[in-house]
Image: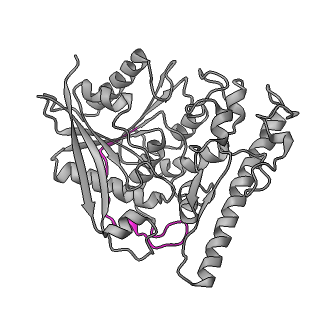
Amino acid sequence: MTYAWDRIPVVLAFSETLKMTETYGFSGSQGKTVLEGQRLVPRDRPSDTVFLFMHPASTLQLLPMPTALAAAGYHVLCCGSRYAKNDSALIMEKVVYDLGAYIRHAREELHYRTVVLVGWSGGGSLALFYQAQSEKPTITHTPAGDPYDLTAAALPQADGVIFIAAHLSRAETLTEWLDPSIVDELDPDRRDEDFDIYAAGCPNKPPFTPAFVARFRERQLERNRRITGWVRDTLDFLARRNDSETERAFVTHRTMCDVRWIDPHIDPNGRKPNWCYLGDPKTVNVGPVGLARFSTLRSWLSQWSFDDSNAKGPLNATNVRHVPVLQIENMADDAVPATHNPIIRDALATSDKEYVRIEGATHYYLNQPEQLRQCIETLVDWSRRKGFLQHEA
């Protein structure tokens, strides 16, 4: 049965006592952090359970899965962080704080008894990061060393976590997509032809040898660490100079370069070759919308640095112990590499975990009504068995 449903705006505003310099303009200029979300509420279907979606930088209220869940008769809350649609200054630790504000609002103001946290795509590692810090908070500073105390935030725990079509983390995924042919971050035209896999003159062609793939991955990690080293050096320079400049923005070129995209034999799943979730990977690699294209120094360390980010999924999965977790892997995902979900599954510390694969499902379920139906049915069945839908209308 399909239900009519309404969109209801949700706006949260709060002040924070910060011991760090706020470099995020909207919060700093207005004196408050303002969050915008949407409730998707089926008509004549009261419920004391809400499925809460959040992504670090995207808004999810128009995507197929949340809207299909509302049409199936279930209450949905789609949450935007303070960095919605602009992740250039995003600090993951602050996004965790924002997520806690929504869960608290859902319980205390909207009167939902049960909150199930749904981590889709980049929201998956966020959900694990949040739940780990709500169960046993440890973070008192950002990776840049700025004070931001999640141990004092009293983050309310979710009742369950659904990890769906989600990758390891922004830092780990970016690293696997960095173009390793770049030899000068200030001049993207200076490239090592041996690793410039989209170039006609590259001597290495698919199917790639295991030795080449291994060296390709090593150079991607080297590039991430090279950028991180420059970021830390620049922050140190600004601190020593001690004038009004405490932050700086920069561009990271070519961030959609992965041997997987053009060689379907590498980490195979049902994705089509020469394609990624944003389109032609060769075009996305040089386009303005790639991951981490625009960033600040502090933001790089928090969300993109392989060695520094606190939001890495496997690390946080080892600290998720007290709630059930449903993990759904889309078997034709054109964003999430096939290796990622098994890593999370094996890392999760909770004994109450289930793993479901949906054959043929792409990242967004676009034009895939059967796979989307299977996703919703899987989610609802699990939620019922866990006692999260005891009071359905």
- Residue at the spot 21% in from the left edge and 26% down from the top edge: 73
Residue found 79% across the figure and 26% down from its top? 206
**Looking at the image, how many numbered discs can be counted on the residues?**
0
Is residue 266 in sight in this rendering? no
| Position in image of residue 211 (x %, y %) | 84, 37
> Does residue 57 appear in this view?
yes
Q: Quadrant of residue 83?
A: bottom left
Is 209 located above or below residue 297 in the figure?
A: above
**Colour pattern of the rendering:** one colour
Residue 160 falls inside the magenta stretch = yes
Q: Magenta part mainly helix, strand or loop?
A: loop
Q: Is residue 367 located in the magenta-colored stretch of the structure?
A: no
Where in the figure is residue 157, as x and y percent of width and height?
Answer: 31, 52
Magenta range is 140-162
Q: Is residue 72 rendered to the left or right of residue 219?
A: left
Asked whether 86 or 306 is in front, the reply is 86
The image quarter containing residue 242 is: bottom right
Query: Where's residue 130, x and y in %?
Result: 40, 53
Identify whether 307 is placed above or below 216.
below
At a point 32% along the width and 55% down the height, the residue shown is 100
Task: Relative to 194, say whether 200 is above or below.
Answer: above
State which quarter of the image contains the C terminus.
Answer: top left
In which quadrant of the rendered image does the N terminus lie?
Answer: top left
Question: How far from the left and from the top, in percent, is residue 72?
Answer: 25, 24
Q: Residue at x 83, y 31 (%)?
A: 200
